[in-house]
Image (cartoon, rainbow, N blue to C red):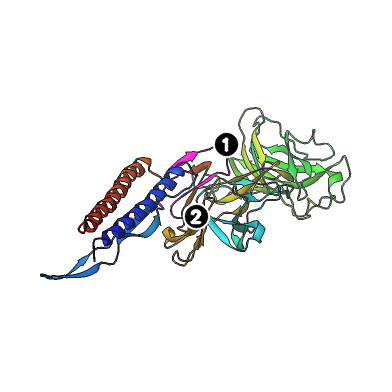
Amino acid sequence: MGVSSALYSGVSGLNANANAMSVLGDNLANANTVGFKSSRTIFGDLLSSQVSGSGGTSQVGRGVGLSTVDTIFSQGTFENTETNTDLAVEGAGLFIVSDPSTGNTSNNYTRAGAFRFNAEGFLVNPEGYNVMGYQLDVNGNTVGDLTPIWANTQSFTPAGPTANINLNTNLDSDSTAIAAGFDPLDPSATSNYATSIQVFDSLGSTHLMTTYFTKTADQAWDWNTVVDGGEVTGGTSGVLEIVGSGSLGFDASGDLITIDGVDLYTVAGDTSSDPVFPRPTANTTAGALDWVNGAVQTQQVSIDMQTSQYASPSVVVSQEQDGFGTGTLVKLSVDEFGNVVGNFSNGTPRELMRIPLAKFTNPSSLTKIGSNMYAQSTTSGAPVVGTIGSGVGNIFTNALELSNVDMAQEFVKMITTQRGFSANSKTITTTDEMLAEVINLKR
């Protein structure tokens, strides 16, 4: 070793600190980049030289080198947004994206969740990469392999035929009993009260369904549900067709205790006992709703009679049914479980696809490929792909994860890096002066 070796130690220090300054500059430049993960430099000393002295063999350092640049995958803070396709990840997971220009042959990974649906209905990032996800079956379970998240913006949602009606009414106990029974040819004269509701068939067509209530005796009523005969097979247009009938029984307090002869309580007639579960309901006659428009012929409607009999005018408190017609897609959103939800014009939401997350054993070794994306490397490990709830992290909607750069910490590192660079430059200039003295030994 000679005096000149100190020059190379100083040069190594200049190079190492220059690289450290580049990393700091990159961190600060991306302080406002969505989903950016900061980096840090790790230095290591170079192989030392062996020198012999009177005290034995010793080692003299030969400078410093850059060991590695680590990516710090600490959690960034969240910013709330007004866009429901803006997504932020809490935890170790990353979104999976793929380049459509290559046929989505390989996946990249990102924490930047500023996504949007493009004109073709694909969920993409600002660079146009497809967000990858899973298709769902009718039960909401994921099926198949990863595929681009896509929604048919011109699609219709199928109709949902009415299966249940909730009918909350009071029947006037002072009504006059009608002994003759209900006649669909003269419903007004053979009933005490009626209520109507629109129901849907399997094609989404609506039908007016009316339920007539006829008092037959004290605490005893009949119910008859009808539709226009022209809407069912064998019926006559303009003539009511009975599609369901039965009886209601009340106790002396006006509470409903039986539907079609079935007790509503475990002890017959005792409303203080436990209710029967599931609650008995009134039902249309099997096969009676054989619509003439080609809809499903086996539709049957269950009517939950939430009915009382008090000395008060007969009235409908509330009624609702669970059917719906066809609808067009009007809005797309993503929920906290990663489900892409389509909201249709008929008011019914539907889960279309599900966004998973990928987790790596060593995310710090992922390769940065620009545009807030990473690629798998040989040392990062293989991705573990899972949906929300499987340990890969959580998704927050209407939010973006901000950069995890701590500006105060970066400026402190910048000061120490600058001092290190200056100190190494002094090593070079001082060594130069020492070499000049050596040259001046011979004049």
Residue 275 position in % (x across, y down): 53, 47
Q: Is residue 286 above or below residue 237?
A: below
Residue at 55% across / 46% down in the picture? 335
Which of the image's four quarters has the C terminus? Answer: bottom left
Evaluate if marks 2 and 1 touch, with contact meaning CB atoms under 8 Å apart. no
- Tell me, yes or no, whether the highlighted magenta stretch contains residue 92: yes
**Picture quadrant of residue 180:** top right
Residue situated in front as seen by the camera: 185 or 206: 206
What is the secondary structure assignment of the residue under circle 2? Answer: loop
Principal secondary structure, stretch drawn in magenta: loop
Residue 154 position in % (x across, y down): 74, 47
Q: Is residue 404 visible?
A: no
**Picture quadrant of residue 16:** bottom left
Residue 205 position in % (x across, y down): 79, 45
Q: Residue furthest front?
A: 443
- Residue 94 numbered mark, or none: 2
Would you say 119 lies left or right of 66 here?
right
What is the secondary structure assignment of the residue under circle 1? Answer: loop
The residue identified by callout 1 is 252
Residue 366 position in % (x across, y down): 46, 60
Mark closest to the chain's N terminus, 2 or 1: 2
- Residue 369 numbered mark, or none: none
**The residue under label 2 is which amino acid type?**
Leu
Residue situated in front as seen by the camera: 73 or 214: 73
Q: Is residue 34 above or below residue 138?
A: above
Q: Residue furthest left?
A: 55
Residue situated in front as seen by the camera: 91 or 21: 21
Q: Which span is picked out in magenta?
A: 73-95
Pointer 2: residues within 10 angstroms few (<14), some, or many (20+)?
many
Which of the image's four quarters has the N terminus? Answer: bottom left
Q: Is residue 202 visible?
A: yes
